[in-house]
Image (cartoon, grey):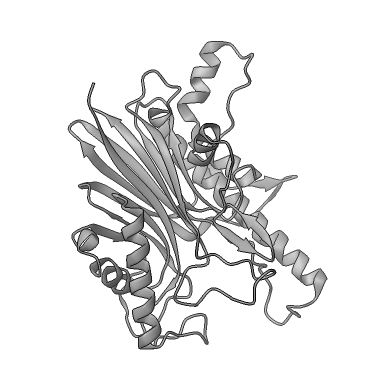
Amino acid sequence: MGSKIFKVGTFNLYNLVLPDVAFYRRLRYSPEEYDRKKNWIARQLLQMKADVIGFQEVFHQRALREALAVSEKYKAYQMIVADPTGSSLVETTAPETPFVALATRFPILEYKVIEAFPAEAVLDVGGAVIPLRKFSRPVLWVRLKLGDGIDCSVFVVHLKSKRPILPDGVDRHDPVEKMKGQARSLILRAAEATALRMILMEVLQGRDHPVIVMGDVNDGGLAVTSQIISGEPPWRQLPSEHKRELWDILLYHVRDIQARLSYRDYYYTHIHNGHYESLDHIMVSQEFAAQNPERIGRVCYVSLFNDHLIDDTLSREGIANWQSDHGQVVATIELRE
């Protein structure tokens, strides 16, 4: 039986903004810094060699298009930015928050920008409704044509970070206020994970349709929020018919697939205060799981591009503002013909 290989990757760009445009009120790139950032992104992309790339932290569509255009390989890729307001098209100002985006060489059949939570995803605790009803950064859903008779749903996500949500006027260095702000961020991230899972269930359940989720979920693979998104594998003593129902809606972390094939696990995509974390993930449905006899393909390799990351608790160096503070992840998928 023949096969063909394609690669999917996720890339947090770390504030991709046009030059001389203020973002987060006081930051901006000089033209020289912007050129260095574009060229660095292009070099990383050439190493990734991905056919589908999910991006996070895009402020301007033109900036991403220019970064892709540096390389002949990516210049012809189709690109979509999950911007429901059109603010990423305004080149003289920057939106308050960045967006996710996708670039691909595969034909795009349809796409949707999802900002609002499904109604059934709204949470309540002890009868009190938590008033969270939309994603901090809209989710991008794209349906791609991978080959004859094979299409795939790709979701690009960027969940709320661990950075504290603090009301105006409070002391940002007060440990109590910081603790409360971190709890607010966690609640929002958990609500976003729940809403994303609801959306994924509509695409996964009862359908032999391949799904890929990629992006910065701002939590490790074993965190509760990550497991909400992926679902948990069935208990081994469950009856086989119940297992099949759960496998149908389960997502597999490509990190775990790679770890089972390796002698050591060096998977980290971010370093903060000496902690090596895996915040950037790619998850696939059972259609790409090797243990599924009816699969249409399998994840056969996972690459990390994190050599530029620096542990600033051990080094006097720091990451330049034209680089990213995240590593990139690429999953190689072998597709059955």
| Residue 262 x %, y % | 53, 36
Up-down relation of residue 7 to residue 207 (above or below): below
Up-down relation of residue 319 to residue 194 (above or below): below
| Residue 290 x %, y % | 42, 26
Residue shown at 71%/63% (left/top)? 182
Foreground: 299 or 109? Answer: 299
Q: Quadrant of the C terminus?
A: top left
Residue shown at 20%/47% (left/top)? 107
| Residue 258 x %, y % | 50, 37
Quarter of the image for residue 166 reads bottom right
Q: Quadrant of the N terminus?
A: top left
Residue shown at 63%/21% (left/top)? 235
Q: Is residue 289 left or right of residue 6?
A: right
Q: Is residue 269 left or right of residue 90?
A: right
Q: Is residue 135 left or right of residue 290?
A: right
| Residue 251 x %, y % | 49, 35
Foreground: 39 or 34? Answer: 39
Specify whether residue 167 is in view: yes
Foreground: 127 or 24? Answer: 24
Q: How many marks?
A: 0
Q: Is residue 288 left or right of residue 254?
A: left
Residue shown at 76%/80% (left/top)? 171
Quarter of the image for residue 204 reads top left
Up-down relation of residue 107 to residue 161 (above or below): above
Quarter of the image for residue 20 reads bottom left
Specify whether residue 81 is in view: no
Foreground: 316 or 14? Answer: 316
